[in-house]
């Protein structure tokens, strides 16, 4: 008995907007990785619709920009690691099922069960490159999209720098 591939949002097969087209381009890149090595018992490098309970948990904590929320809803990364220029050993993208827990060590100290004081409350970790966080700056949300920033980990003071001016530009970069 085999395992079925993860669910696929229909907009990957018939993209109607820029977000859909960028997700399709990223999925095409990921499909090459999946073709080389894939165990459907433990699927990796898929974009799949998010579970509604994960979205409810996320919405209870943050007000996400529309673009990112739609991306998670339709194309939530499932154990995705993207390689390419600027991503060193690979960018691990957090999907909807791991977004809340993915804040641990950055925004939240899970050992002491409390927020980390020097982490800006409006920063949401959406992935990392070898523990260097990639974040959305929710304070800059313009209802539709927001900048993506990064900073090296293991330093005394976080020094964030811009990666891209919007999440869509970030997806464009990932899909190359």
Image (cartoon, rainbow, N blue to C red):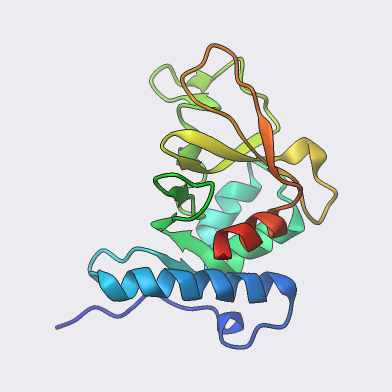
Q: Which residue, as the protein is rendered here, is positioned at the far left?
A: 1
Quadrant of the image containing the C terminus: bottom right
Residue at figure coordinates x 42%, y 16% from the top left: 112
Q: Position of residue 106 (x, y in %)?
A: 52, 27
Asked where in the image residue 70 lies, by quadrant, the reply is bottom right
Q: Name the foreground residue: 158 vs 103.
A: 158
Residue at figure coordinates x 46%, y 53% from the top left: 97
Q: Position of residue 15 (x, y in %)?
A: 66, 83
Q: Which residue, as the protein is rendered here, is positioned at the far top?
A: 156
Residue at figure coordinates x 44%, y 44% from the top left: 88
Q: Is 34 left, or right, of 21 in this rendering?
A: left
Q: Is 64 left, or right, of 57 in this rendering?
A: right
Asked where in the image residue 83 lies, by quadrant, the reply is bottom left
Q: Position of residue 43 (x, y in %)?
A: 31, 66
Quadrant of the image containing the N terminus: bottom left
Q: Is residue 116 visible?
A: yes
Picture mark count: 0
Looking at the image, is 92 positioned above or below residue 176? above
Q: Which residue, as the protein is rendered here, is positioned at the far front?
A: 85
Looking at the image, is 32 positioned above or below residue 109? below
């Amino acid at each position: 008995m085999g395992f079925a591939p993860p669910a696929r949002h229909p907009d990957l097969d018939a993209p109607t907007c820029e977000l859909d087209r960028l997700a399709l381009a990223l999925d095409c890149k990921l499909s090459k990785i999946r073709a080389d090595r894939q165990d459907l018992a433990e699927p990796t490098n898929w974009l799949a619709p998010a579970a509604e309970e994960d979205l409810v948990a996320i919405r209870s904590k943050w007000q996400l920009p529309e673009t990112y929320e739609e991306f998670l809803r339709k194309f939530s990364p499932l154990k995705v690691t993207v390689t390419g220029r600027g991503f060193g050993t690979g960018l691990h993208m957090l999907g909807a099922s791991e977004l809340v827990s993915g804040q641990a060590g950055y925004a939240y100290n899970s050992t002491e069960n409390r927020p980390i004081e020097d982490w800006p409350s409006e920063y949401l970790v959406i992935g990392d490159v070898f523990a260097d966080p990639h974040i959305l700056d929710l304070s800059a949300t313009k209802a539709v999209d927001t900048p993506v920033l990064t900073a090296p980990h293991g330093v005394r003071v976080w020094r964030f720098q811009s990666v891209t001016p919007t999440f869509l530009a970030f997806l464009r970069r990932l899909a190359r």
